[in-house]
C-alpha cells in the first residue's frame, strides 16, 4: 500500500443491480479458473498522481469479472450496458459497478438506465478528499 494524493471531484456513477455476490465464492471462482491478471497498479498510481482520468480508466481491471460473468449473466448485463458508455468496472468482488462519467453524459445515462432497469440502484457520486 502507498499513500496517494486526494483527487476530489472525480465524477462517477455507481450502479447496484439486485444481484448478490458471495465474496468467498468470487475468490473461489477466480482460483478455479486461474484468472489472476497482470498488476496494473503502477499505471493506476501514475494516473492518480497526474489526475489523468483516461489513463486511470485504461489502467483499471477487475479479475472477478471474467471469473463471475459466465455464471452470473445479470452481472454481465450490467457490464455490457455500462461499457457502451465508457470504461466501467465491477467494484471489488461485486455486485456494484462504477463508471468514470460526469456532466450531461452522466445525467443522460442515468435517465436511460432508470427507464430500462428500474430495479438497478443508481448513485451520482464524486471522489472526496482535500488537495495536498
Image (cartoon, helix red, strand yellow):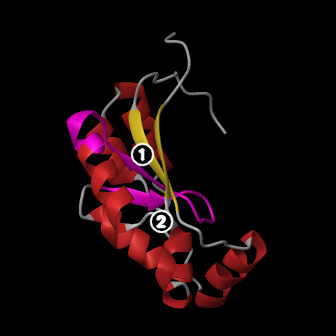
Q: Which residues are magenta?
A: 87-107
Asked whether 129 or 34 is in front, the reply is 129
Q: Residue at x 42, y 54 (%)?
A: 60
Quadrant position of the N terminus in the picture: top right
Position of residue 71 relative to residue 115, above or below, is: below
Q: What residue occupies the far right of the structure in this picture?
A: 24
Q: Residue at x 55, y 27 (%)?
A: 4
- Magenta span has 92? yes
- Element at badge 1? strand
Which dot, 2 or 1, sits closer to the camera? Answer: 1
Q: Residues within 10 Å of mark 1 (few under 14, many from 20)?
A: many
Could you say which quadrant of the image residue 104 lies in? Answer: top left
Q: Is residue 11 left or right of residue 14?
A: left
Q: Residue at x 50, y 70 (%)?
A: 37
Position of residue 129 relative to residue 76, above or below, is: above
Q: Is residue 1 left or right of residue 87?
A: right
- Element at badge 2? loop
Asked whether 113 or 44 is in front, the reply is 113
Residue identified by numbered label 1: 13
First of labels 2, 1 by sequence position: 1
Instruction: Name the mark on residue 91.
Output: none
Where is residue 69 shown, x and y percent of the image? 49, 82
Q: Residues within 10 Å of mark 2 (few under 14, many from 20)?
A: few
- Magenta span has 60? no
Instruction: Name the mark on residue 38.
Output: 2
Asked whether 58 or 65 is in front, the reply is 65
Where is residue 87 shown, x and y percent of the image? 31, 56
Amino acid at each position: 500500500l502507498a499513500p496517494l494524493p486526494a483527487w476530489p471531484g472525480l465524477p462517477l456513477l455507481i450502479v447496484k443491480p439486485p444481484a448478490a455476490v458471495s465474496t468467498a465464492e468470487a475468490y473461489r471462482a477466480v482460483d478455479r479458473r486461474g484468472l489472476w491478471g497482470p498488476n496494473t497498479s503502477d499505471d493506476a498510481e501514475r494516473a492518480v498522481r497526474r489526475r489523468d482520468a483516461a489513463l486511470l480508466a485504461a489502467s483499471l481491471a477487475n479479475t472477478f469479472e471474467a471469473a463471475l460473468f459466465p455464471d452470473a449473466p445479470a452481472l454481465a448485463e450490467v457490464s455490457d450496458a455500462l461499457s457502451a458508455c465508457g470504461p466501467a468496472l465491477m467494484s471489488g468482488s461485486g455486485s456494484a459497478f462504477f463508471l468514470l462519467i460526469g456532466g450531461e453524459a452522466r445525467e443522460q445515462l442515468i435517465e436511460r438506465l432508470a427507464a430500462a432497469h428500474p430495479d438497478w440502484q443508481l448513485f451520482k457520486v464524486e471522489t472526496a478528499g482535500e488537495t495536498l
